[in-house]
Image: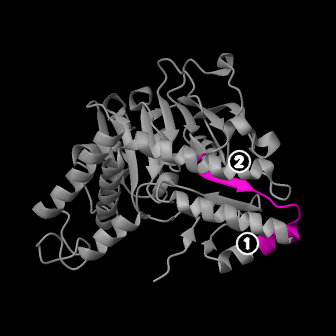
Amino acid sequence: MKRVYNFSAGPCMLPQEVLETAASEMLDYKGSGQSVMEMSHRSKVYDGIIKNAEKTLREIMEIPDNYKVLFLQGGATMQFSQIPMNLMGEGGEADYVVTGEFAKRAAKEGAKFGKINVVASSEDKTFSYIPELDKSKFSKSAKYFHITTNNTIFGTRFTELPETGNVPLVADMSSDILSRVYDVSKFGLIYAGAQKNMGPAGVTVVIIREDLIGNAPANTPILLDYKTQADQDSLYNTPTTYSIYMCGLVFEWVKKLGGVAEMQKRNDAKAKILYDFLDKSKMFKNPVTPKDRSMMNVTFVASSEELNEKFIKEAAAAGFVNLKGHRSVGGMRASIYNAMPREGIEALVKFMQEFEKVN
């Protein structure tokens, strides 16, 4: 069986070792006589699976004891609503930095629940950079300060976190969680869809400081109140059982390789190979301000739209799939998450070199 190099932005490739473990346990999970897909989320066996997943995530991210880890549904998009519903309060306000499409959507959704102060935006240059932040524009009465740490579509990232004082920093880490070391204690809330660096689509991880739980208005739908799930250890209703199981396997894989610090080291090395080529290439260019370049999503364009289309087609035929850029920006995008091996990047660069020679 030949596996392709999958550069999809998400759902993306998973570690082969994890897939092999899941395959071996598909029909009989550790002698239980059943698949994880079949077992009750109230069973003792599944309770061990979800608790171990949380335990391992806490270990590899060094999550402090005063934070809850929640396994929720609805994707990061649901959090665009759930966060202001829980944190903003009646007539409250929040600060947002708009650095990409999903950050823009988050701010738009937040505006349904209170006053949104966009302290900075990079939309003026098609989100090709991370804007400098002017602290004088920060709202002292903000209930939280929202950023998107890595921008999947445009290929940018925050290299320094904003200093927000007593205002809780809230971060959408969907596309770079577990890829680099973050000090969780600097955040009030972290959220991330699993389908990029943690596991298959379906589950969203929320890491929330305990003092931010229990402040939702009385009319908040019960399943959208963080307290509901925090009190029930993410088991108030049926969770995405198999996705959580798969995430647990990925967490164990990260731990086995040396933890998040080792993943960051590997990811920086992988990205450097690709960016070094792009910086020397006469055909391909990366449009992002160099200091703000993402280590997870590398965007690039050829010298003409015709060559873009030709490259995507020929790359797919050669086993490099899902390189087409997001429809809003075009060109190409190589998403090189944790599970993408260094060999995949080296093979892609070799293919790009040959393509450039011929064309």
Whether residue 303 appears in magenta in the rendering, the answer is yes
Residue 9 point in image, percent of width and height:
58, 61
Q: Nearer the viewer, residue 22 or 186?
A: 22
User: Residue 46 in magenta?
Assistant: no
Classify residue 337 as left or right of residue 108: left
Q: Is residue 28 left or right of residue 57?
A: left
The residue furthest bottom is 1
**Residue 350 visible in rendering:** yes
Q: Amino acid at mark 2?
A: Asp
Question: Mark 2 Cα within 10 Å, few/some/many (few <14, many 20+)?
Answer: few
Q: Which mark is residue 279?
A: none
Cα distance, mark 2 to mark 1? Answer: 20 Å
Image coordinates of residue 312 in percent, x first then y, are: 73, 72
Return the residue nearer the eye: 215 or 264. 264
How many C-alpha atoms fall within 10 Å of the one at disc 1: few (<14), some, or many (≥20)? Answer: some
58 displayed left or right of 111: left
Q: Quadrant of residue 18?
A: bottom left
Q: Please give the residue where the numbered disc 1 appears in the rendered image.
A: 312
Quadrant for the C terminus, please.
Answer: bottom right
Q: Residue at x 76, y 68 (%)?
A: 354
181, 75: nearer the viewer = 181
Q: Which residues are magenta?
A: 295-311
Q: Which residue is mark 2?
A: 276
The residue positioned 71% from the left and 27% from the top of the image is: 132
Q: Amino acid at mark 1?
A: Ile
Number of labels in the image equals 2
Disc 1 element: helix
Relative image position of residue 106 (x, y in whole percent): 59, 45
The quadrant of the picture occupied by the N terminus is bottom left
